[in-house]
Image (tube, helix red, strand yellow):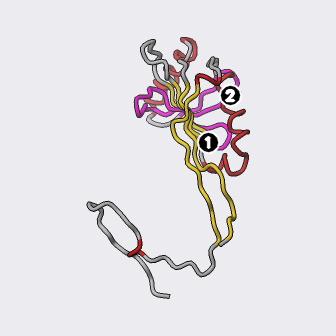
Amino acid sequence: MRVVHRGFDRLELAIESNASPKLTEALQEAKDRAEQEGRALPITYGGVDLDIQPHGGGGYRYLLRGGLMDASFAIKKPNPRDPWGIRVMVGSEFLATLGLGHARRYIEATLARLGVRFGPQHVSIGRADFCVDVLAPGFELVPKQFVMHSHANRADHMDEM
């Protein structure tokens, strides 16, 4: 068995900061237009080009995607009782090709251009997936050796070779 690649596959960060009133106003106007058209629309703010979705999700009012390799930004309507107002998601393509360090610099630069103020103490890892790709000649998948929840339905889909 040989390790072909290893590294982070997905990273989600929660940011302890809220969008400024100016950013919130721009996001709401763009979201209203996206809702009227029923599709994601481009928005430029602070030199950052993203697409805003016509809907929110997961407790976030504004969902933005785009930029470098489709990083995603979820932003809540500002609420002083909930300071964790921003979530950033970076996927496997970004992390595999550019690395974790570049992802960190990109996130910091993008949020700064959006006018979001935060420091390292205001960042919490919400999710981090790590993958290992291996080349294993002679590996044989044996479905009976898998352990799964008692309520799971087992269905093997194996073709004879």
How far across and down, in percent of the image, does residue 116 sit?
Answer: 62, 19
x 65%, y 52%: residue? 7
x 63%, y 17%: residue? 117
- Foreground pick, 155 / 131: 131
Closer to the chain start, of discs 2 and 1, is 1
> From what the image shows, is residue 154 above or below residue 33?
below
The amino acid type of the residue labelled 2 equals Glu
Quarter of the image where one finds residue 133: bottom right
Q: Which residues are magenta?
A: 41-69
- Foreground pick, 141 / 61: 141
Query: Which residue is identified by label 1?
Result: 70
Mark 1 surroundings: few (<14), some (14-19) or many (≥20) residues within 10 A: some
x 30%, y 62%: residue? 152
The amino acid type of the residue labelled 1 equals Asp
Is residue 59 inside the magenta stretch? yes
How far across and down, in percent of the image, does residue 122 sit?
Answer: 58, 22
Mark 2 surroundings: few (<14), some (14-19) or many (≥20) residues within 10 A: some
| Secondary structure category for the residue under label 1 | helix
- Foreground pick, 37 / 121: 121
Q: Residue furthest left?
A: 151
> From what the image shows, is residue 14 above or below residue 70?
above
How far across and down, in percent of the image, does residue 142 sit?
Answer: 44, 77
x 32%, y 69%: residue? 154
Is residue 56 inside the magenta stretch? yes
Left or right of 87 in this view: 120: right
For the residues carrying marks 2 and 1, which lies nearer the camera in this image?
Answer: 2
Do the residues bearing badges 2 and 1 touch, measured as CB atoms within 8 Å? no
| Secondary structure category for the residue under label 2 | helix
Label 2 vs label 1: CA separation?
A: 16 Å
Query: Which residue is identified by label 2?
Result: 108
